[in-house]
Image (cartoon, rainbow, N blue to C red):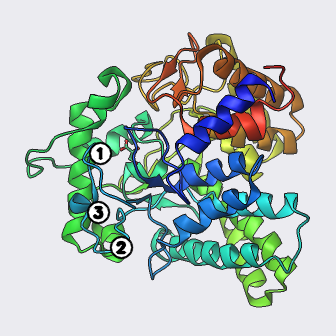
Amino acid sequence: MTGLNARAQEILRRNDRGGYTVPTHGLYPYQWNWDSAFVALGFAEFDRDRAWREIETLISAQWEDGMIPHIVFHQEDPGYFPGPSVWATGKTPPTSGITQPPVLASIVRSLWETEGADPACPRMAALYAACLRSHRWFHQYRDPLGNGLVMVTHNWETGRDNSSEWDDALARVDTSGVGTYQRRDTGHVDAAMRPTQQEYDRYVAILQFGRNTGWNHREIADKGPFRVLDVGMSMELLRANRDLLVMAQALGDQPTIAELEARIALSYQGMDWLWNDEVGAYCSRDVTTGESSGLVTNASFLAFYADVGSPAQGARLIEALARIRTSARYLLPSLEAGSRDYDHKRYWRGPIWLVVSYMVAQGLVEQGHLDWAEQIRTDSAALIETSGFYESFSPETGQGSGGPDFSWTAAMWLAWCGKGRAA
Ligand code: DGY
């Protein structure tokens, strides 16, 4: 085994807390929803049982209404804010009150298929049922326009926490009642790599709104202070519904097959609402104002992963990628350089996140853009080879930002960009 392969496995083992993995020691001491999905792909390379367990542990905290929470607080840890008492969801185990990108079904399909796609696989069947309940929750609570897209009610749900895409909607959030609290993230990593204090106040204000409703997701969706159609989650859910459909077909679940087919058709049509012809890319849209963000982010390119868009739209996205290539030493930045508030070190305002790069590259392969997929893959590997297993990386210098020894970065090395590298 090569050095980096061994190191990546060691990181996953060290961040393993028994059935679940923390994203990184210190900064994120609990189980995060989409982190666990990608981490399972990493474990799958050397411990299949542990890969399934990662997702099964997450699912054990699924809410009765189907929502899979974004954080599961398996144990107390004073080093994180906002912890379980701030969310106050009253669940056992304690959880946050919001969700995260719906990528689980796609990862479950991948685990199942690499083991031979046996329709009688009980672990697949159980996770299929859990993912279906979660997708129905999205369809029921997060599609206010009935167009098959995903509305988020907290920017933390998107996983792209401080993307400039949320700035206008966040600027309307009233923070006058937030009160005092102590951030913990900036005690773990350089504050220049994290959201600003003003942004954090807004995040906390949105959380408090949800808590004050008793986590009533109907009320939050109708009246919440932050209501945005996220291009990333819309693409991911469409992809995940297609992957779920493959499992439904294998299981012969006829009523669900029809339900998912209708849903998928609706989402394909709805995606046009996110297309911004001026910038030639898919962008998020504010539900309250109807405004498009007009920003090209790494999530814009998830259109390939979701198999969305006409050939002409695909060509414009490739043009955007080529333009980004001229300013970014490494692909794929989370925000195009030169965009409002671009910052190559600050979280989702520029840095590269390998899990999004992985999904985009997978989509590019499927759509026949093999050279672009390979460029993203080799750049991603080079970042780890140069800087280590960081949370994210500067597209300009390749330096790591945020937490070190990061679980999903290790997983992406093992399952994707490190494959075949002489490390
Ligand atoms: C954080 O605490 O920064 C997390 O991203 C929230 O999910």
For residue 308, say whether it is visible.
Answer: no
Query: How much space separates mark 3 and mark 2, taking CA atoms?
Result: 9 Å
Q: Is mark 1 within 8 Å of ligand 1?
A: yes
N-terminal label among 3 and 2: 2
For residue 169, say whether it is visible.
Answer: yes
Labelled disc at residue 224: 3
Q: Nearer the viewer, residue 196 or 152?
A: 196
Q: Nearer the viewer, residue 259 or 156?
A: 156
- Image check: 214 left or right of 358? left
Which mark is nearer the camera, 3 or 2? Answer: 2
Q: Secondary structure at mark 2?
A: helix
Query: How much space separates mark 1 and mark 3, taking CA atoms?
Result: 25 Å
Q: Secondary structure at mark 1?
A: loop
Residue type at mark 1: give it: Tyr
Labelled disc at residue 80: 1
For residue 224, which quarter of the picture?
bottom left
**Pointers 2 and 1 in contact (C-beta within 8 Å):** no
Residue 239 percent coordinates (x, y): 71, 58
For image coordinates 63% across by 76% down, the residue present is 132
- Density class for disc 1 (Cα within 10 Å; few <14, some 14-19, many ≥20) is some
Residue under label 2: 217
Q: Secondary structure at mark 3?
A: loop
Residue type at mark 3: give it: Gly
**Pointers 1 and 3 in contact (C-beta within 8 Å):** no
Which mark is nearer the camera, 1 or 3? Answer: 1
Ligand number 1: quarter of image: top left
Residue 161 percent coordinates (x, y): 41, 42
Residue type at mark 2: give it: His
The quarter of the picture where the C terminus appears is top right
